[in-house]
Amino acid sequence: MRILGIETSCDETAVCVIEAEGELGDFQYKVLGNALISQAKLHEQYGGVFPNLAKREHEKNLVPLLTKALMDSGLAKDGNSLADITHILEREKELQVLLSEFLKTHGKPEVDAIAVTHGPGLEPALWVGINFAKALAHAWQVPIVPVNHMEGHVILSALTGGKDEIFNSQFAICNKPKFPMLSLLISGGHTELVLSKEFMRYELIGQTRDDAVGEAFDKVARLMGLPYPGGPEIDRLATEARGERFNLSHGLTTAQERLNLFHVVLPRPMIDSDNYDFSFAGLKTAVRKVVEANQPLTDEKKMEIALEFENACAEVLVAKTMRAIEEFGVETLVVGGGVSANMFIRESLVQAIKDYGYSTKLFIPPRELATDNALMIALAGYFRACKKEFAEPDSIRANGNLKLA
């Protein structure tokens, strides 16, 4: 089965074509074509993603990315797909023009279904991808599978975590996750622990009560005067501090040790609570107080704050995750979302599982696939398509707050 995946939930525009076969356990796939454009630089001036700008850029980028993905896959066809799509894209005028021109010179490719993100995310951005998918489905007469963005992260991590060669011409060797499976989803919009006792079934056991961890990274970076996106900047500063300034391999264990060494102590919110929820708003407020007390911030102080903040986030995430692994007898831990690209968090989870002596398998995707991409939507779409979970185009709606469980 060939699936065209479309992702526009935030500030990445992405299109991917895969060929896949089999079920979990004997599943294999190969990436035929993949294209992505990040808008991060455009949103830097706002210190975060500006929804209407994201929508405009998606309109501009989708057809060129579709063209590239189809050309790379060898599925691009000469001819035309004459169909009236103006009523579908009446709110996306630029996209309407670009896609109309594309359909005049391109015939229907050999794809079996279109998978598109319908939530969660920024609704103006989601609508562009959804309407694009509807227009293509109308022109090509193929079905649509609406995909939960977070399920995309789960399935991508579960199948490809630890694999390096994803984008090649051969069928990929996939993981075979065992159950119960625990998903730690950490991004700019989510911090969740999700338990799966079987494939594609989800139970939310913990979530943030305020800021997501990725949101906290970006807000703390802004407080420190660092550029957007803030997560990679804090990761960079903390890595420099850990390796070059303090020669640390792990976070220090006591507040007094941290105070003695680099004079910054931040809380570990909810680390000892009797549930699996998270809270990062108070940690952000604690950073603000440190920043205000140390104006103007020196480069040295920025490194110290970044180190202590990253340590605090990692320790909370690891502590909650390890406790859930023990309580639920977790066989597989998958980690997904943009914050899973953070090297210290990745290494801390690896070390924690080793230290605890668990047999739990840990699957984290390659860093280039930690952030939003269309491969994860195509993969999730394949498994939904196998269940015949297609939707009538008119019934698909953008849902910015769509839940996984």
Image (spheres, rainbow, N blue to C red):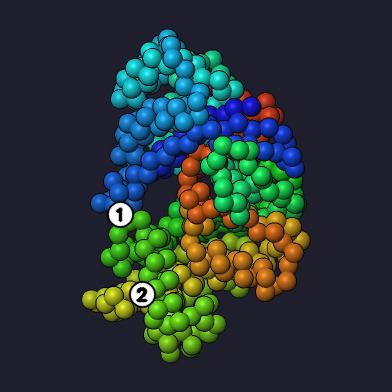
Amino acid under disc 1: Gly
Query: In the picture shown, does residue 71 fall above or below 350?
Result: above
Q: Nearer the viewer, residue 254 or 252?
A: 252
Is any atom of residue 222 visible in this view?
yes
Position of residue 194 measured from the top left corner of the image (x, y, whole percent): 64, 53
Query: In the picture shown, does residue 160 fall above or below 269?
Result: above
Residue drawn 43% across and 90% down? Answer: 260
Task: Please give left or right for residue 32 compared with residue 129 in the image.
Answer: right
Residue 275's image quarter?
Answer: bottom right
Give the labeled residue for mark 2: 303
> For numbered disc 2, what is the local secondary structure?
helix
Is any atom of residue 394 visible in this view?
no
Position of residue 226 measured from the top left corner of the image (x, y, whole percent): 30, 63
Q: On the rendered image, what quadrant is the C terminus found in?
A: top right
Amino acid under disc 2: Met
Contact between marks 1 and 2 (CB within 8 A): the answer is no
Residue drawn 70% across and 29% down? Answer: 387
Query: In the picture shown, does residue 250 fall above or below 18?
Result: below
Give the labeled residue for mark 1: 47
Which of pointers 1 and 2 lies earlier in the amino acid sequence?
1
